[in-house]
Amino acid sequence: MRSVVLGVSAGIAVYKACELLRLFTESGHDVRVVPTRDALRFVGEPTWAALSGNPVTTEVWDSVHEVPHVRIGQHADLVVVAPATADVLARAAHGLANDLLTNTLLTARCPVVFAPAMHTEMWEHPATRANVATLRERGALVIDPAVGRLTGADSGPGRLPDPAEIFEICRRVLAGRAADLAGRHVVISAGGTREAIDPVRFIGNRSSGLQGYALARTALARGAEVTLVSANVALPDPAGAKVVRVEAATELREAVLSAAGHADVVVMAAAVADFRPSRQSGTKIKKSAAEPDPIHLVKNPDVLAELGEIRREGRAPSPRVIVGFAAETDDVLANGRAKLERKGCDLLVVNQVGENLAFGTPDNAAVVLVAGGDPVEIPRGPKEDLADVVWDLVATRLA
Ligand code: CTP
């Protein structure tokens, strides 16, 4: 059983750490919670003790015969501090040891993950920036906070990322997975485009964006810089990703092509409409019209094919690896193979879609077709697992 120390410091996001604790215990980890004194003002000792099944102390003066200020850190396989306040980052960066948590941070020789949460001004203050830089230089993994609503009415960078996101990063660190995408810029398109008919109606598709967002979260956890071109997705922004919101295929094309020029990898996970209405009504079409006008469609640009073409012709700086997705209902492999060649991509993730398959579900199964290689089958499982296999194949091609 892996031993995890969950350090909790005094931010309003402490309540989310209860959820993180549950994710650890339910997946078989032995968790020792070490809150700071003030963190207990938000969530009390009995909650941590009951959820972890372990004693909870904040001071070095409790159970001194067990030398907790040294032992807890020495025996940990991972220390994660969530939420990490500006104060705890400062104390950790400067090597202070004035409570049990900071003592534990000094004695731990295992990987350390900080999930900061604070107001934007505090996160952006030069003192905090310097402390984060120091901790990162020493090898700690400091997760960028999410952007969104903070305590009160204001919003900006500073939110604690989703507990599931922090857990995913920790799981990966515990598994010893290297940050093999560090220094790489990846562009991912996700969701489904909407092609306007009039100001209120559109032609859309069933894509939820779950697979694209799983690709973004896993790439971030593996150290990549991520630009996420997001088409009509109702999911929280992955912490640390640059999110560019688009609606129609033509906007998606512009966003992807402009980011692709400085990217190592482009993954086209979005469901892009092949056609759009040839004209959009500037006003709402009324049902009083005796006979509705037929909607005439014109072809949209194929962004994936265009990326392949630009690279083949050397027209502009291009990503080293281009990944496409294909949704097929029949003749899955044959159609996929033809598409891989037609679109000039390196990898094509082929999903079989239909009722209850792929769209909107947390699970996915696929075959990845590899240019010049054998196909890789991915059994049904979480979309994160599929994303990891894609990144494994991408990392091999980049190496
Ligand atoms: N794609 C794209 N631009 C489009 C349509 C699709 O970039 N206008 C990308 C998708 O993001 C996906 C891949 O192409 O990565 C496959 O899309 P799919 O719709 O399955 O294939 P099509 O080429 O449209 O072929 P068909 O509809 O005939 O199956």
Image (spheres, helix red, strand yellow):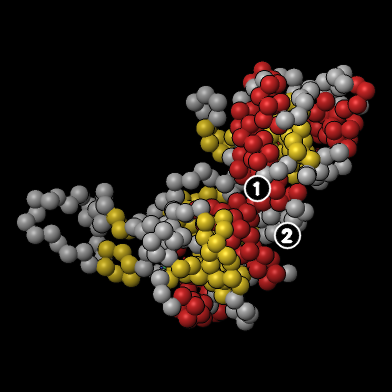
Q: Earlier in the sequence, mark 2 or mark 1?
A: 1
- Height in image: 227 above or below 29? below
Query: Splitting the image into 4 quarters, where does residue 66 fall?
Result: top right
In the displayed structure, does residue 289 sit left or right of residue 169? left
Q: Which residue is mark 1?
A: 168
Residue located at (61% from left, 35% from top): 19
Mark 1 element type = helix
Residue 195: horizontal and vertical position, in percent?
32, 58
What is the C-alpha distance between the residues marked 2 and 1? 16 Å
In front of the other: 323 or 277: 323
Label 1: how many Cα within 10 Å (few below 14, some 14–19, many 20+)? some
Residue 237: horizontal and vertical position, in percent?
53, 45
Residue located at (13% from left, 59% from top): 292
Q: Are marks 2 and 1 in contact (CB under 8 Å)?
A: no
- Height in image: 362 above or below 355? above
Label 2: how many Cα within 10 Å (few below 14, some 14–19, many 20+)? some
Residue 104: horizontal and vertical position, in percent?
84, 32
In the displayed structure, does residue 299 sit left or right of residue 384? left
Amino acid on which the number 1 mark rests in the picture: Glu
Q: Tell me if I can see residue 377 in this picture.
A: yes
Mark 2 element type = loop
CB of mark 2 near ligand 1 (< 8 Å): no
Query: Splitting the image into 4 quarters, where does residue 64 fall?
Result: top right
Give the number of the mark in front: 2 or 1.
1
CB of mark 1 near ligand 1 (< 8 Å): no
Residue located at (71% from left, 26% from top): 49
Q: Which residue is mark 2?
A: 180
Residue 62: horizontal and vertical position, in percent?
85, 19
Query: Splitting the image into 4 quarters, where does residue 61 fall?
Result: top right
